[in-house]
Amino acid sequence: MEEQMTFWDHLDVLRGSIIKVLVAGVVMAIGVFFLKDYLFDIVLWPRDSDFPTYRLLGADPFELKLVNTELTEQFMIHMKVSLVMGLLVASPYIIYVLFRFIQPALYDNERRASYRLVGAAYGMFIVGIVVNYFLIFPLTVRFLGTYSVSSEVETLLTLSSYVDTLLLMSLVFGIVFEIPVIAWLLARFGMLKASWMSEYRRHAIVAILIAAAIITPTADIMTLIVVSLPIWLLYEISIWIVKLTNKTPQTEEEECLEESVSPSPSSSSSS
């Protein structure tokens, strides 16, 4: 029979997990740091008119210059991008370590349900980053980088502005692509119905257009439509997922997951 771990034992395990996460992130970041040429070939590729998205859409050739305005800017951006990319590369191992920490507190059925949930959430986050890199960000950069109020004004985009926009939009779309996963969870807990989503579809479309306008503050209607389209498709996919979830009876794993999230009646009555 296994001994029950004390609070300090759990604290030691948590400390060890945090150290593993930090070491993995730092090691990957250092490795990426020394691959500077390959790293920034990827980061700076969307500013090139030869980028696959522009060729696919038949866009006219354009030139986008990036400038450096501060002494330490390029080095600090190199470190920032290396750290973010290192964490992204190490993210599967980081998730594995964190999941191993909470795994002993879960039942077998809860573990199987958690595997699916975490795997789906991570996969959709990566898909959101990829969609942003190959579709949303290039169109945004092309429009804003080539937009001019007068031929006498030359556009010189700073490197920090370019990189910060790329990282922010990647994070935003990674989160946006979690919509189907969140919808499934809400539907499984009985908090969301497909009929509600269908009834408020028009409102959702308006909200999507507003969100797309905030994410990509451009006056280009084509860019606005292209940005809104993936979010609208996610909403429609979420309706389909919620509809299937409402019709499908809960499995044992999902019931355990719901019970682990919802407070038990006995605990609420005792309080």
Image (tube, rainbow, N blue to C red):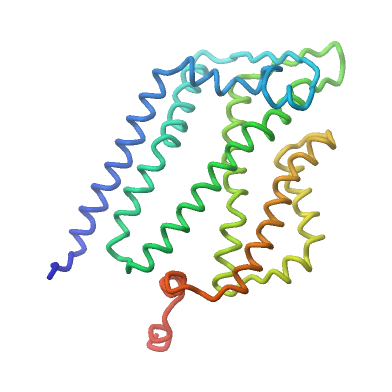
In the displayed image of the protein, which residue is found farthest to the right?
A: 150
In the picture, residue 136 is in which quadrant? top right
**Which corner quadrant holds the C terminus?**
bottom left
Which residue appears at 67% of the width and 71% of the height? Answer: 193
**Nearer to me, 203 or 241:** 241
Which residue appears at 51% of the width and 47% of the height? Answer: 123
Q: Is residue 139 above or below residue 113?
A: above
Relative side of 112 to 63, left or right? left
Which residue appears at 67% of the width and 56% of the height? Answer: 237
Relative side of 99 to 117, left or right? left
Which residue appears at 39% of the width and 37% of the height? Answer: 90
Residue 196 at x, y = what percent? 73, 70
Residue 239 at x, y = what percent? 69, 62
Q: How many marks?
A: 0
Residue 121 at x, y = what percent? 51, 52
Relative side of 27 to 9, left or right? right
Q: Is residue 263 above or below residue 169?
A: below
Relative side of 28 to 218, left or right? left
**Which corner quadrant holds the N terminus?**
bottom left
In the picture, residue 151 is in which quadrant? top right
Residue 67 at x, y = what percent? 63, 13
**Nearer to me, 200 or 22:** 200
Q: Is residue 255 above or below residue 39?
A: below
